[in-house]
Amino acid sequence: MSDVRIEQATHLPDDAVSAVRALAARAADADGIDAVSEAFRLALTSPRASVTHLLAYAGRPGPVGYAGRDAAGAAELVVDPSARRAGVGRALLRAVLDGGATGVWAHGDLPAARALAASEGLVPTRELHVMERAVRDGDEVEPTLPEGFSVRTFEPGRDEQAWLDVNRLAFASHPEQGSLTLADLQDRMAQDWFDPSGFLLVEDTTTTQDGGAHPLAAFHWTKREPGSTTGEVYVVGVHPAYQGRALAGPLTGLGTAHLARLGVERIELYVDGDNTRALATYRRAGFEDAVLHVVHGRPPAP
Ligand SMILES: CC(C)(COP(=O)(O)OP(=O)(O)OC[C@H]1O[C@@H](n2cnc3c(N)ncnc32)[C@H](O)[C@@H]1OP(=O)(O)O)[C@@H](O)C(=O)NCCC(=O)NCCS
């Protein structure tokens, strides 16, 4: 293949967005997994997203590879299956690292990604587990919360700020989730899968705040793409002041009960490899490892 040329942009014209989506779809077919995650997919068209898009061209019309790099230093890259082993992946990887990327996602931990990353001197710096399980008889029964807590559904227009506050505190050590803004939340609320009846808020009913509302102690946001037979434990968080009070188990069960009542057949979730308490909660709830996503980055300085 002739030389690889890389073009960078923060906004993509419609035809480039279509070409990247088509390329990513061909790669997902070939690899059995999406290389471009939801956040980067949304960033292809969101004017608010601070993502730099890199399109690789190599001697034929249209891009043969795509990489995205966000302001926090995370990057994703994918090469068209018909253009692989010709240096496109290496060129994109070097370009995102030169541009300041500190970690590159390898969704599904595919052998080609592992080999490419290692050949550039990168090492795994983070592991994200996808866990799943089948829905079983009895899942639809709502668990009982500990004394002093009650559950209600998220109310758009009322609960955004309280949720953002608890999300930020619960995920203080989790770079992507903890830094979600009102605009990020509204982007997700505008998606066709968003359903407030599957966004469950647990409140501390033993006390009230200014204005008379009960404080938000924890939440379980579930997700189901329209028509899908798989549901997702999308985000579960417990306010630090309410951690250690036996909420995690029933909180997980509230969401799985909601998904079971929707009629899904399987439930999946994503959890960081270093989040041992969450991993243990989900294993206890019957979830098993299904896929591993790995971030590759520069080895820590000695
Ligand atoms: C990983 C991926 C980006 C590689 O793209 P590519 O254009 O084929 O990669 P390159 O041609 O630049 O390969 C560079 C080096 O990576 C390694 N490599 C790439 N594919 C490989 C494979 N299938 N098996 C073994 N080694 C491989 C080799 O060391 C290769 O050098 P070589 O060809 O001189 O031996 C591509 O397979 C892809 O899009 N996969 C799905 C998305 C993904 O996993 N992205 C994460 C990237 S970290």
Image (cartoon, rainbow, N blue to C red):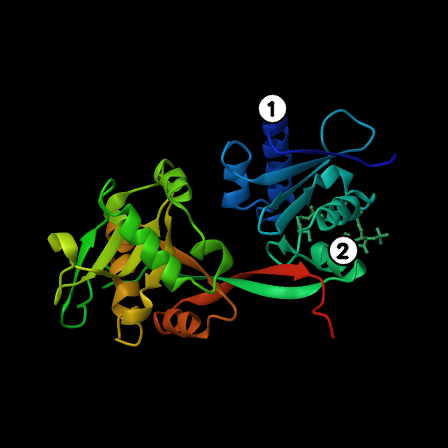
Say which quarter of the image contains residue 157: top left
**Would you say the residues marked 2 and 1 are in contact, meaning their CB atoms lie under 8 Å apart?**
no
Residue occupying the point 33% across, 69% down: 240
The residue carrying mark 1 is 13
Residue 183 image position (x, y, % from top left):
40, 40
Indicate yes or no: mark 2 CB to ligand 1 under 8 Å.
yes
Quadrant containing the C terminus in the rendered view? bottom right
The residue carrying mark 2 is 116
Q: Can you see residue 173?
A: yes
Say which quarter of the image contains residue 82: top right
Say which quarter of the image contains residue 68: top right
Residue 48 image position (x, y, % from top left):
49, 35
Residue occupying the point 67% across, 51% down: 101
Residue occupying the point 16% across, 59% down: 209
Q: Earlier in the sequence, mark 2 or mark 1?
A: 1
Say what amino acid the circle numbered 2 marks: Leu
Extreme residue toward the right, this view: 2
Label 2 to label 1: alpha-carbon separation: 30 Å
Quadrant containing the N terminus in the rendered view? top right
Q: Can you see residue 263?
A: no
35, 4: nearer the viewer: 4
Residue 128 image position (x, y, % from top left):
53, 62
User: Regarding mark 1 in the picture, which secondary structure is present there?
Assistant: loop
Check residue 103 in the rendering and tell me which mark sits there, or answer none.
none
Please determine whether, in this image, residue 11 is positioned above or below residue 282.
above
Residue 178 image position (x, y, % from top left):
43, 57
Say what amino acid the circle numbered 1 marks: Pro
Give neighbour class at mark 2: few <14, some 14-19, many 20+ (Cα, 10 Å). some
